[in-house]
């Protein structure tokens, strides 16, 4: 298995969910697994744009990340190529649902051996990312 898929329904409109993804200030608040924070160096939110940041782990370690936004179809799709190791393509699709928005998250690794080796990290981390995205969307809705 090289691709990990998960999804989440968020009780908000597609545009509201996309806003939490497309606004670099909000993206920095929720991106990554539980306990991580981010320092963005560049976040050129456009197709072909660079996204460079450092994730700060709860263990005190820093994790540099280099990415390219390879496809943005506002407000329904985002594709990110993770250019630093480990190499993967992340596709996020947003679709209207009865509950609000269905977020589909697909992370496809280039190397099946790498994917197998880090599956135990990736699967819960992707769920935590969606937890944090949901919380950010709901936070913004409550403050508006």
Image: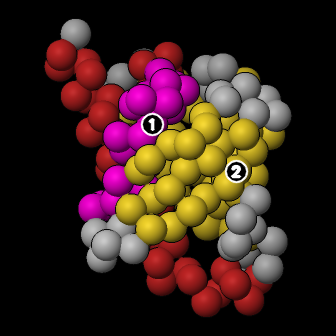
For residue 27, which numbered disc appears in the image?
1
Q: Earlier in the sequence, mark 2 or mark 1?
A: 1
Neighbours of disc 1 within 10 Å: few (<14), some (14-19), many (20+): some
Of residues 51 and 69, the one nearer the viewer is: 51
- Is residue 24 on the magenta stretch? yes
Residue 106 to residue 123: above or below: above
The quadrant of the image that shows the N terminus is bottom right
Name the image quarter holding residue 58.
bottom left
Horizontal side of 128 relative to 72 (left or right) equals left
Residue 123 shows up from this direction = yes
Provide the residue designation for mark 2: 67
The residue drawn where x is 61% and y is 59% is 65
Q: Residue 87 location in percent, x, y?
A: 74, 68
Q: Which residues are magenta?
A: 18-37
Residue lying at 49% horizontally and 30% vertically, measured from the top left: 24
Q: Is residue 140 left or right of residue 105?
A: left
């Amino acid at each position: 298995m090289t691709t990990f898929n998960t999804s989440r329904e968020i009780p908000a409109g597609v545009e509201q969910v996309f806003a939490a993804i497309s606004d670099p200030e909000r993206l920095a608040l929720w991106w990554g697994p539980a306990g991580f924070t981010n320092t963005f160096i560049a976040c050129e939110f456009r197709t072909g744009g660079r996204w460079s940041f450092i994730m700060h782990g709860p263990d005190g370690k820093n994790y540099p990340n280099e990415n390219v936004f390879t496809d943005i179809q506002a407000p329904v799709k985002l594709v990110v190529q993770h250019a630093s190791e480990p190499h993967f393509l992340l596709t996020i699709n947003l679709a209207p649902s009865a509950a609000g928005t269905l977020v589909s998250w697909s992370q496809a690794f280039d190397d099946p051996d790498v994917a197998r080796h880090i599956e135990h990290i990736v699967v819960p981390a992707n769920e935590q990312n969606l937890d944090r995205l949901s919380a950010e969307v709901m936070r913004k809705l409550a403050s508006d």
